[in-house]
Image: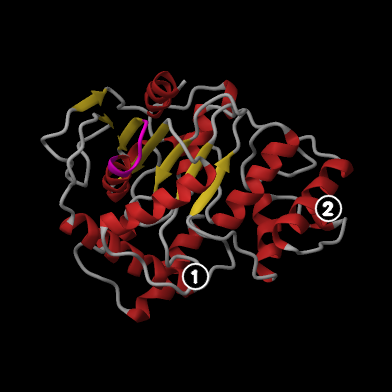
Amino acid sequence: MNAVRDEPIGTGSMADTGYERPRDPVEIWLARQWQRILGFGVGIRESFFGVGGNSLDAARVIDAILVEFGVQLRLNVLTEHPTVERLAAVLRDHDVRPPGSLIAIQDGDGAHTPLFLVHPDDGQVGRYCLLANALGEEFAVFGLQAEGLYRDTQPSRTVPSMADAYVNAVRAVHPTGPYLLGGCGVGAAIAYEMAVRLEGVRLVAAIDVELLEPLDTVVESWSRELPRQAQLPEILADWQERGLVPPNATPEIVARSLRVWQANREAARDWRPSPYTGPIDVFGREQSTTLPATVAQRAHDCDTADRLAAALRELIG
């Protein structure tokens, strides 16, 4: 059983807990199913049967895959592929990918308002699994992932256009307020613009991404010099070695990540904030995306990951 719930989160980022988070939408979907069926969250390399799953639970996983994706897997597939990481590789072989930009990370108990977290500059939402894990299983958490990462679509290039699209996605699952919004980097700017467009917003959280995970030095280097096409396999190998992408990922994910990162950086640079009368809650260091000076900002002393989770629980509980 995952012991993360019963231990302090640590004094650094949430990645210091030992919990190995999902890295793409397929792994996030599978991890959520395991949490729903087993009753607790697990890392992507923990064995389904090793943490307490049985044959009936395995059949429920297979049924969920059939209902969601129309893929009929053998009943013993979890015996051969007993981790989220390995079963996700099987699903990718069937070209399975959850649709849309809204990614359900954690279902919650239905008693709390869901938290919607917008992707940072790299467009990914996997790091928000760390935050969901730290908040507690009673909280529903959704991630809003950038277009163009896992599909052959062009990424959005303005903060308002992303806010419009993400508001529609949020309303599809949560038609009326109250709303809890947040994000890291450009995600904080997009969450701000979403708040302008929604009624009943209770939270706009600007979160220091390093409270969740250390910055990827490879991606950070792109602001100084963009990689050449010939360097993409080398970057992929580095990401795979550090467990940042699945083992069967291809250089295409690096190329798409680069396009999304560039689009988000341009969007943040060109952003002109709309008027907003509500406050912004700031967690951690000064934000990489400049927030409007005219809007009230409430700073939270969150120099550690456990303080971030505690402060958010107090605000959204």
Labelled disc at residue 151: 1
User: Relative to 91, is 273 above or below?
Assistant: above
Q: Is residue 269 left or right of residue 200?
A: left
Q: In the image, what residue type sits under mark 1? A: Arg
* Front position in the image: 205 or 16: 205
Q: Secondary structure at mark 1?
A: loop
Occupied quadrant, residue 287? top left
Label 2 – label 1 distance at C-alpha: 31 Å
Nearest to the eye among marks 2 and 1: give it. 1
Q: Badge 1: how crowded within 10 Å, few (<14), some, or many (20+)?
A: few
Magenta stretch: includes residue 197: yes
Label 2 neighbour load within 10 Å: few <14, some 14-19, many 20+: few
- Identified by mark 2, the residue type is Thr
Give the farthest residue toward the left.
294
In the image, the segment drawn in magenta is 196-200
- Residue 212 in the image, given as x and y percentages of width and height: 40, 39
Could you say which disc has been placed on residue 79 in the image? 2
Q: Is residue 224 visible?
A: yes
Q: Is residue 210 left or right of residue 293?
A: right
Nearest the eye: 282 or 306: 282
Vertically, is 233 above or below 169?
A: below
Q: The N terminus is located in which quarter?
A: top right
Upstream in sequence: badge 2 or badge 1: 2
- Mark 2 secondary-structure assignment: helix
| Residue 118 in the image: above or below residue 94 | above
Residue 21 in sight: no
* Residue 55 among magenta residues: no
Q: Position of residue 278 (x, y in %)?
A: 24, 30
Could you tell whether 212 is left or right of 246 in the image?
A: left
Magenta stretch: helix, strand or loop mostly: loop
Residue 249 in picture, x, y percent from top left: 54, 68
